[in-house]
Amino acid sequence: DSETKSEQNDVDRHNKPRLRRSLIISAFIEKYSHLVQVINAPVPSNCDLVGLYSSVHDVGMIQFLVNSWSKWKAMGPNWDSDCCQPGWKGNTPPPLVPCHAAFRRDGIERVSSNVMGAFGYYCTDSLTPIVESLVTELQEDASIICEAVNLALLRNSVVYAATTHPGHHSNFDNFGGYCYLNNAALCATLMQKRLDDTAGNRRVAIIDIDYHCGNGTASIFYRVPDVFFTSIHCDPEIEYPFNAGYEDQIGEGAGKGTTLHVPLAPGATWEDYKPALEKAMNAIMEFDVGGLVVSMGLDTYEGDSVSVRKGGFKLRGNDYVELGKTMGRYMKDSFIPTVFVQEGGYKMDVVGEAAADVLGGFSEGTMKG
């Protein structure tokens, strides 16, 4: 209900994924109703998150996400205050936040049956909350991704997947950074399955344009030869997620050469960003793909509350139209079925318009003449 959604929008002072989704959909309708068709993806009552995401995630981690709220709720009413969202004043049980970290590189450690211990085993930070509506929202997001892939390939078109939660910081068996399940990775694997069924070119590319490196997506496909991943992001020596997103990380084994990181210095403007985007798009076109996934983060906007804490980029206004146009121009002669998947973006007064402008610009860029 509206009261519960309002409470959950206030779980974190920066991250308001439900509000972001609503603002983006409204902006598409207001600015580009002549270009877009809004379709609600059906959510099966038996939507199987384990079955869908097991191709890109550890089954144990998925099952943790599915069962964690019921386990946490059962521990009440005297919940461990260390694992309660600080300052929570809602009417539902407090959101669960990580409070215990595991030695993930130590083989002696294993997943605890206690939900608080398991949370620390799978989660990489102390911010990403488990809330009552999470499983339902993840099922909705999965259905949106499935429908987006179907439409993009069936119609040879561009589709925006308006998911609630981002996913690009989730790797095979870890999640964090406000991400739970990696929707871009699921999108790419579903594209490949559909392309296999139609005897199409199964090579797929993912371009991540979030301010933060899509480290989870990079990790999932780091040794995969037929998925090209490229990310344009702030220098990982300065900004989250740190430790990944360096230029010399190009893939390993069979996947060597299929990863391209393009880190930029804090304060990057459109003049700095455009050559990086062209470098990434040129590499994608050289890879010769049958499908494209765009991890669309909008925290590159000047003044974004999450990004400015360590640096921030300075894209603004019409830059997002130009960003979309720049990408779309590569599709003029031979269109590639494309799915935009929502990632981050925390400047709520502009996030909707920025998203709409990227898609509007992309559409304009693909037009011939």
Image (tube, rainbow, N blue to C red):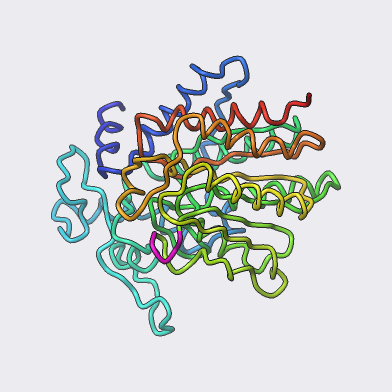
How far from the left and from the top, in percent, is residue 151?
A: 69, 32
In the rendered structure, which segment of residues is drawn in magenta? 235-239
User: Viewer-proximal residue, 75 or 228?
Assistant: 228
Tell me, yes or no, if residue 136 can be seen here: no
Q: Main secondary structure of the magenta part?
A: loop
| Residue at (53% x, 28% y) in the render | 357
| Screen quadrant of the C terminus | top right
Q: Is residue 179 left or right of residue 306?
A: right
User: Viewer-proximal residue, 173 or 50?
Assistant: 173
| 196 up-or-down from 122: above or below | above
How far from the left and from the top, in percent, is residue 261?
A: 58, 60
Q: Is residue 310 left or right of residue 323?
A: left
| Residue at (65% x, 52% y) in the render | 279
Tell me, yes or no, if residue 277 can be seen here: yes
| Screen quadrant of the N terminus | top left
Examine the structure image and report whether residue 300 is included in the region drawn in magenta. Answer: no
| Residue at (38% x, 49% y) in the render | 312
